[in-house]
Image (cartoon, helix red, strand yellow):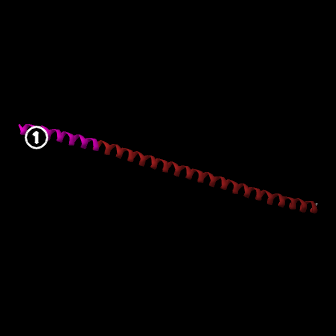
Amino acid sequence: MTKENQRFNQQKNIYDTNLNTQKFLAGVGQQAISSDIAGGTNLTNAMARNTMNATNNNNALRMQGAMNTADMYGDISTSTNKAIANKLLYDNLKD
């Protein structure tokens, strides 16, 4: 009976050691997956932030370009109106 108990205890110790090793490996795998998920999430968030910043900067540049074009046409209109007014004034004073 004593030998059977010793053999049982040896087998139980081997089983417990293997079980603990498997639990440890499962924990390592879970940590790896968690790290992988966190890394993917961080990368996705960074890419989304960079895309939004690039889009906002692009839109700001387009808006500034449109405002510059509008200012240019406004200046052309003002210059044309002044030239016409000066020509009419010149024509009236010439007579």
Residue toward you, 88 or 75: 88
Q: Callout 1: few (<14), some (14-19), or many (20+) C-alpha neighbours within 10 Å?
A: few
Residue toward you, 56 or 39: 56
**Quadrant location of the N terminus in the rendered image:** bottom right
Q: Position of residue 62 (x, y in %)?
A: 38, 45
Asked if residue 74 lies left or right of residue 93, the reply is right
Q: Position of residue 25 (x, y in %)?
A: 73, 57
Magenta stretch contains residue 94: yes
Q: Quadrant of residue 93?
A: top left
Read off the magenta span. Answer: 72-95
Q: What residue is rendered at 12% in x and 37% in y?
A: 88
Asked if residue 68 lies left or right of residue 8, the reply is left
Q: What residue is rendered at 57% in x and 50% in y?
A: 41
Q: What residue is rendered at 36% in x and 44% in y?
A: 63
Q: Main secondary structure of the magenta part?
A: helix
**For residue 70, above or below residue 49:** above
SS class, disc 1: helix
Q: Which residue is mark 1?
A: 90
Residue toward you, 2 or 25: 25
